[in-house]
Image (cartoon, rainbow, N blue to C red):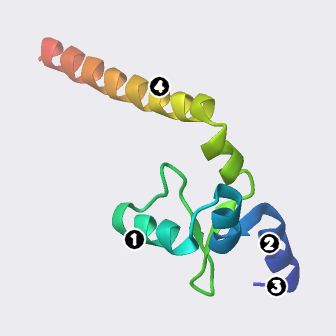
Amino acid sequence: MTSNQLAQLFVRYLTTDELGHRLNVKARSIRARVRKTGTYFGLKPVKGPNRLLYWAADSGERLLGGAQSGDQVADSAQDQSADSVVAERDAGEKS
């Protein structure tokens, strides 16, 4: 990874400590939840080459303000599952 790529990484991402500060929670609480579930309430970190977790720069805003973005994710997941049920039903009717 070049220094330019590393610099871009830091511009677009927050460390776990920075995210914790923005959300007013302890960083170790975030890390514990990620260990258990793989996400922090729907926010998925990127693992850096130095084994640290990095979060999208707008993660705090999406989580705090974000019933709208969360609803969109939930709606999208429901739409996909509904589409798969319909596709399975249609495949069964054709057989």
* CB within 8 Å, label 1 to label 2: no
Please state if 6 lies on the left or on the right of 45 as rendered: right
- Which residue lies at the image location 46% right of the left edge and 31% below the top edge? 74
Q: Which mark is residue 75?
A: 4
Chain-order first, disc 4 or disc 3 = 3
**Residue of label 3:** 2
Q: Amino acid at mark 3?
A: Thr
The Cα–Cα distance between marks 3 and 2, rounded to whole angstroms, is: 13 Å
Q: Amino acid at mark 1?
A: Arg
- Which residue lies at the image location 62% right of the left edge and 87% below the top edge? 50
Chain-order first, disc 1 or disc 2 = 2
Q: Position of residue 58 (x, y in %)?
A: 73, 50
Q: Amino acid at mark 4?
A: Asp
Q: Pick the quarter of the image with the N terminus.
A: bottom right
Q: Secondary structure at mark 1?
A: helix
Q: Amino acid at mark 2?
A: Phe
Q: 49 or 15, which is in the foreground?
A: 15
**Residue of label 2:** 10
Q: Secondary structure at mark 2?
A: helix
Q: Which mark is residue 35?
A: 1
Which one is in front in this view, the residue at disc 1 or the one at disc 4?
Answer: 1
The Cα–Cα distance between marks 1 and 2, rounded to whole angstroms, is: 23 Å
